[in-house]
Image: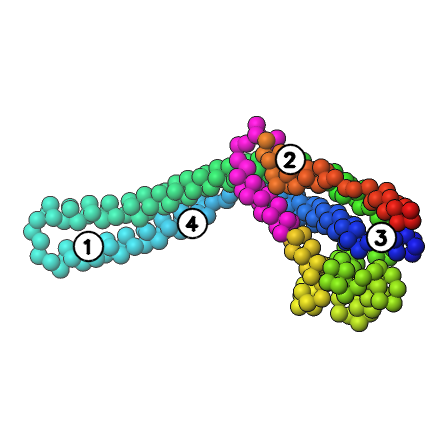
Amino acid sequence: MEEKNSCLDIEFIKAYLQSSIELETQKRIAEQTFNELLREENQWKQKMSYVAKKRYTKFSIWDMLFMACKGFGISLVILYVIITIIEFADFNSILFEDILYFIWFIILAMLVVVIPIYRKITDYIDIKENSILDKQRETSIRQQANNALCIIQDNKGKLKRAYRCAVNNLTNTYSANIIYKKYQTVEACASIYDYLESGRCYMLEGPYGAYNKYDDDLAKGIIIKKLEEIGSKMDMIIANQEKAYCVMQKIQKNVEEMECDMKNIFQSLQDVDGKLNDIANNTKITAWASSVIATQVPDWKREAQDRANKTYI
């Protein structure tokens, strides 16, 4: 392979690396978006476990009796006041006394009978209304969850197909053996591309080649080996791995856009049973997965052989 690599020009290698990076990016986007859908799926399954609560009275018969007794006690106090007024006041009108006793009787009825019964009735109505609302909420959540899970399953299938397509394309690309197997990762490809693009290296192999520089930078800790480490080493990545940083941004942007699109769809899944297929086929995941499946990847193995043969001729 050393002899073959020496016959390949830098621009060809850069184009090959760019293709490898793009396929690696597609693979990562499919993986992360799929994981996000799994999280959404688990959340909706948890929501489906919601069951309308059985409501119990907050105002029991004992509460009614207690309120009636309390009202009766208050009415006795009022009666005592009325009797005191009648005894100490000089009222010559029997009608006025009757009116006072009638008012007391009304108060007695209100305190002992009417108010406790009213409280019991309103408590029953509240229980009934809240039970209906809870049942409606349960039905709504189940319907929305079923619709969401249907769309999630459909889009998970599309992501799986896109992932398999990206992996197959990547396998075919790496099988060209244009770069060593050790460096067949998005992080390594991105760093090697940076070295060649910036002019820091003019070849892959040798003491001043991109392979050696990548290993040396990795050993010194000035570049990262895994994109997952970016969060804690952002400044270093921006300074030394521009291509890797762009790949990371592209992955995050695509995953976030597709995740946001799905969340917006889930928020409007009410009474759309007849439109589920249309909704599932018009997501950003569907569009992205279709673009991945439609990706045309050059036959890099043949390209490399043709270039090597032309060089030897």
Does residue 157 appear in this view?
no
Say which of marks 1 and 2 sits in front: 2
- Give how far across and how far down residue 267 sits, in percent: 54, 42
Picture quadrant where residue 200 is located: bottom right
> Which residue is under mark 2?
150
Tell me what residue is drawn at x 62 percent, y 43 percent. Answer: 44
Q: Secondary structure at mark 2?
A: helix
Tell me what residue is drawn at x 25 percent, y 48 percent. Answer: 107
First-in-chain label (4 vs 2): 4
**Label drawn at residue 296:** none
- Give how far across and how far down residue 117 sits, in percent: 36, 42
Q: Is residue 223 left or right of residue 281?
A: right
First-in-chain label (1 vs 3): 3
Local crowd at mark 3 within 10 Å, few (<14), some, or many (≥20)? some
Asked if the residue at tag 4 contacts the one at tag 1, i.e. Cβ–Cβ closer than 8 Å, the answer is: no
Q: Amino acid at mark 1?
A: Ile
Local crowd at mark 4 within 10 Å, few (<14), some, or many (≥20)? some
Q: Amino acid at mark 4?
A: Asp
**Label drawn at residue 82:** 1
Q: Amino acid at mark 3?
A: Leu
Q: Is residue 287 left or right of residue 197?
A: left
Say which of marks 4 and 2 sits in front: 2
Range of the magenta residues?
A: 253-277
